[in-house]
Amino acid sequence: MTAMKIRPVQLVARKTEDRVPMADSRVRIVLIDDHELFRAGIKSMVSTAMGFCVAGEARNRAQAIDLVKRERPDVILLNIDLKSGDGLGMIPELLSACKLSRLAVLTGSRDPEIHRQAMLLGGIGIISTEDSPDLLMNAIARVNQGKVWIDRDVTAKMLANLSTPVELSPEGKKIATLTERERQVIKMAAMGMKNRQIGRALFISEVTIHHHLTSIYSKLEVEGRLELIVYAYRNRLADLPR
């Protein structure tokens, strides 16, 4: 009986650079605050919590915008009580720097109007600087999921304020008559798009765009496209060109 010949198996070690790295599934946070000790405290909390990490820190507007553009974090944690006084004003810029990021504000203020403004500007979480570490991490996790986080007391005050009738300015009354489609047309016109381009973008005819513009001119009491664009910039119906 002929013996079978068994070939030796050659083991080849895989090079380190050939290994496929595992994706980092942690929630990446950018922290913006002008107090170094406060940032250190927040970073320490985040670092000890499983599933989270601080991707970067910034202490002012310029640093914050660059950092968000570079790191593209899951959550932007912004303390709006900055000494520079521009905390609220930074929210739209930060969200424009990375449209996929979600933003939560930290604040020591209990003023419901400030909280309301933060939400209107794009924040989806209001976190008190007096909250516990566990509450902070729960808030960040919820904001990362795209869910709103607001303290119950703050919510009650905001709803109470919203229930109070607000007298609109003359321009506010005009703007309130615009439909959602008309607002879209205004934004695109302010970007320099022609009627045909706007129609293609909105999947409607050029004739329909003309009708929308005629209605807009009448409602806002403006004469023509150029006056409409100036009006849109002045009343924040469109973003100023950068």
Image: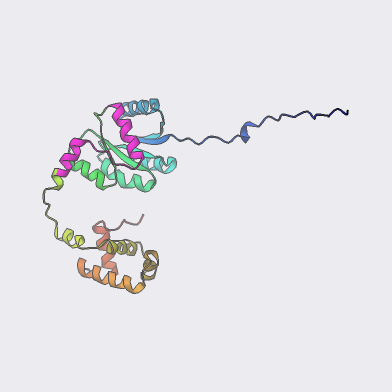
Position of residue 58 relative to residue 201, above or below, is above
Q: Is residue 189 above or below residue 61?
A: below
**Quadrant for the N terminus in the image:** top right
Q: Residue furthest front?
A: 1
What's the magenta bit mostly, secondary-structure-wise?
helix
Residue located at (24% from left, 70% from top)? 215
Residue 6 appears left or right of 69: right
Asked whether residue 59 is in view, the answer is no
Residue 8 lies within the magenta run: no
| Residue 237 pos. (x, y %) | 27, 58
Q: Indicate the quadrant containing the C terminus: top left, top right, bottom left or bottom right.
A: bottom left
Q: Is residue 144 magenta?
A: yes
Which image quadrant for residue 25? top left
Front-most of residues 193 and 173: 173
Identify the residue shown where x is 37% and y is 25%. Answer: 44
Q: Specify the quadrant of the image occupied by residue 139.
A: top left
Looking at the picture, the colour scheme in use is rainbow
Q: In this picture, which residue range is highlighted in magenta?
A: 132-159
